[in-house]
Amino acid sequence: MPSPDADSSRLDDAARAGWLYFIAGNTQDEIARKLNVSRATAQRLVSLSRSERLITFRLEHPIAACMELSQRLQDRYALKHCDVVPTDPASASNLVGIAEAAGSFLEQRLRSDEPTIFALGTGRSLRAAVDHIPPMNCPSHTLVSLVGNISPDGSASFFDVLTRLGDLTRAKHYPMPLPVVAPSRSERDQFLSLAPVRKVRSLAEKADVTLVGVGQLDDTAPLFVDGFITRKDLDDLRKMGAVGDVAGWVFDENGRIVEGSTNERVTSVPPQPDSPRLVIGVAMGASKVAAVEAALKGRLINGLITNEKTAAAILGS
Amino acid sequence: MPSPDADSSRLDDAARAGWLYFIAGNTQDEIARKLNVSRATAQRLVSLSRSERLITFRLEHPIAACMELSQRLQDRYALKHCDVVPTDPASASNLVGIAEAAGSFLEQRLRSDEPTIFALGTGRSLRAAVDHIPPMNCPSHTLVSLVGNISPDGSASFFDVLTRLGDLTRAKHYPMPLPVVAPSRSERDQFLSLAPVRKVRSLAEKADVTLVGVGQLDDTAPLFVDGFITRKDLDDLRKMGAVGDVAGWVFDENGRIVEGSTNERVTSVPPQPDSPRLVIGVAMGASKVAAVEAALKGRLINGLITNEKTAAAILGS
DNA sequence: AGTTCGCATGAGCATATGCCCATTGTCGGA
DNA sequence: TCCGACAATGGGCATATGCTCATGCGAACT
């Protein structure tokens, strides 16, 4: 067969093949016959029409943007998991969407027969997520808390994610019977030497799946608002360049855990950068963008559940 | 699993599945895992994203328009074959493109091992097509002419497609040693009773593939320009509503062979409407649009090789 | 002109896909 | 509250697809 214009002719055929395959819905056998080539060649032409961008796909659906953002986040930060849900235009700042997404993620993993250890942080996002989980019976799983469940005023913490989920699932669960931040470093160290606390920490380190909220350190910082740290702590931390927290541990803009200040007194299980296990951050909102981005950079989390707007802000900055 | 917003949720998932499949290039197994459904369901979702037009395909290539036109022509006129080649913007009115297309169609069929009878009309398009065919050895095929090869002046016809192709292919070939239009009806009938002529006609009727040009009947009508019919014939035919010819047989705007006039004297093999065999018209150009359209309507041809502009004109009128 | 390199080709196989069917779960009505 | 109808689900099979490999052809270089 003569081959004048071999290149353009090949691309023409690729275009034809792509058209017949994707638009007309032909099988590659039919295309092979119509173009008078072998099926293998038809396959190559179809493949070529994609790789040469002769044919393009367009998804006419709000989800498309989310998928795109999710993919880019996964690529940029080497995430093991990333959900981006559409930002609900009706409700500007509530947790609709990511709570459901985090909830169904959790539910899915809970329904697995594989015995799994779940480590849980705290915060509004996680609490909302757990509120979307229906009662189910999964006694073979283990739930363990990363953070103390004693409020600054001595009561049980308001966002007791662990107990709530334990009730729903009848899974064994291990709360951490401590204040989140101890009054001093030495008291913290004393707490940590307690047997039940050590048990929880060793479990948490083996957790297959970790879910944490991500806190910001502006004036609405959850750690401060909920009374875990003082105004002075907050100011000190910000002077040290801290931008956010995960399970009470405060980190700077590169996601590095800062030394000193409240980090010397926090009783939570410390996040392990670059964990081989799945560590998912659940967070959304303009105020959390910097914190989430830092946590991603420092690989304090290797998974993310957020919404479209937040995802776009993280990628855009 | 709870099903609030079952519909929109299902479409969302379909969109996700479509995105993952077509844009991210995931397999349906991967999609099934990511969306936490069975593979069968993932398949349904991908399928749904196409049928609901959530995902659309766009072919960024000049060929796309041709494919589209070709498909529409095939659908509208129930064609067995249709090639639409890009209109070469550089060369407004020559036969580049369709000649190559017709040539390679013919070449392809000639290369087949299946012994095939090819019936050939005449005209510039077919001649140009044959000029694109390289020498090859296919003695098992048979070529037969639909039209006489004697010019009005008694010489061999200028566009002797058959002999030329016979030389190139070493196939057995049967020319029709007749003038295209006899001086009178009775002379025509005499010619047709000759043994060699009857042989040719019986072969032509069994032809597996027929290729014909399509002539227009305006002032540049090939039949007239080449001297097969007189000016008066032409005027008469047009008064009778004739718009074109195939192998010398003249038809009206609905593709019905007109009665009387030159059709009483033409010696060619008459076209058979709605033939079960493949009968391909090869033609292009604004002046031929009406003629081609009529031939398609009357099913004098059930295949077409033309160019983009002509195809668009046929469909647009 | 001879030789070598590179690329396209088609056979064949492992995998992915599409679809049928039995089953399950859900919803509306008695 | 129970029943029947319907739709969605996942198993399983026939088919289509993607990919590897050995081969052949043409182009470029010597």
Image (cartoon, coloured by chain):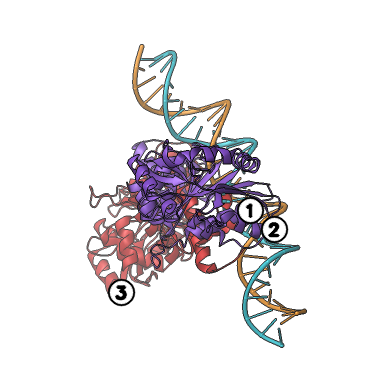
Chain colours: A purple, B red, C cyan, D orange
- Using the numbered discs, state the Cα–Cα distance from disc 2 to disc 1 in whole angstroms: 9 Å
Left or right: residue A167 versus residue B196 is right
Q: Which of A264/A184 is in front?
A: A184
- Using the numbered discs, state the Cα–Cα distance from disc 2 to disc 3 in whole angstroms: 88 Å
* Of callouts 2 and 1, the N-terminal one: 1
The residue under label 2 is A137
Give the image location of residue A111, x and y in percent: 65, 54
Give the image location of residue B83, x and y in percent: 40, 53
Which of the labelled discs sits on residue B240, or is there none?
Answer: 3
Give the image location of residue A20, x and y in percent: 45, 53
Which of the labelled discs sits on residue B92, or is there none?
Answer: none
Chain label for disc 2 = A
Which of the labelled discs sits on residue A110, or is there none?
Answer: 1
Element marked by disc 3: loop
- Same chain for the residues under marks 1 and 3 in the image: no
Chain label for disc 3 = B
Q: Amino acid at mark 2?
A: Asn
Q: Amino acid at mark 3?
A: Met
Q: Is residue B77 above or below residue A193?
A: below
